[in-house]
Amino acid sequence: MGNGMKTEKKNLVLIGFMGSGKTTLGLKLSYRLKMPVEDTDKLIERREKKSIRQIFDGEGEGYFRACETALLRELAQKQTNPKIYSVGGGTPLSPDNRPLLRQLGTVVWLRVQPDTVYGRLKGDTGRPLLQCEDPLGRIRELTEQRREAYAACADITVDVDGKSTEEILRQILDALGITEESAPSIGGEVSF
Ligand code: S3P
């Protein structure tokens, strides 16, 4: 296979809590593997012509979750050149979504501790679920509630706390069986 991956599934799917680094790692992997990256939140925002915050405020979380499932269903059926997908932190929660995520590609869980998330997202206004009196408490509660759903989807789990992006990237590539020699170097053609 062109990008040195030993896995049979061609796409990579990044899952993990808000602030786990899915977007950053998606971009890094994209450059490293010469694979385009797509963010499902951004795809939904583009389709709906609204920000996630506006969708939650206007149509409600249920509507947003239905958009996520519809989009996943579409992506899982589509035959495209290999891509990296980063999906919203709540996507694996729906039992309908879990088989779709696994059908879509090799699922990489960026596992993160609540304190790390809090440090990264303190003051962020784009995550509707964290706009509350006690965001750290909320993060702890949601992390606990979501652990099993993430674990049920993941082919590969990487703990991200206290690691540099480069270290995490290396661990993901190792887990995928991609060696320095087999992976293409940075600078190839990537379309976003
Ligand atoms: C959500 C995570 C967000 C976004 C929405 C809901 C969640 O995506 O989909 O705010 O339920 O965890 P990120 O994980 O990219 O922040």
Image: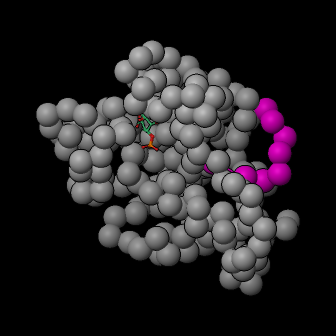
Q: In the rendered view, does 29 fall on the left or right side of 57?
A: right
Q: Nearer the viewer, residue 182 or 29?
A: 29
Answer whether residue 51 is magenta in the image: no
- The quarter of the image that holds ligand 1 is top left
The residue shown at (40%, 30%) is 53
146 w.r.t. 108: above or below: above
Quarter of the image where the N terminus is located: bottom right
Q: Main secondary structure of the magenta part?
A: loop
Asked whether the viewer can see residue 177, the reply is: no
Rendered residue at 51%/34% (across/down):
91
* Outermost residue toward the bottom in this view: 181
User: Residue 161: x, y in percent?
Assistant: 34, 64
Residue that sits furthest to the left in the current view: 133
- Residue 134 percent coordinates (x, y): 15, 37
Residues in magenta, as a range: 77-85
Q: Residue 101 location, x and y as percent?
A: 63, 38
Q: Is residue 161 left or right of residue 21?
A: left
Residue 145 versus residue 15: which sits nearer the camera? 15
Q: Residue at x 37, y 21 (%)?
A: 57
Q: Residue furthest front?
A: 49
Asked which quadrant contains residue 5, the reply is: bottom right
In the image, is residue 79 part of the stretch drawn in magenta? yes
15 up-or-down from 163: above or below? above
- Quadrant placement of the C terminus: bottom right
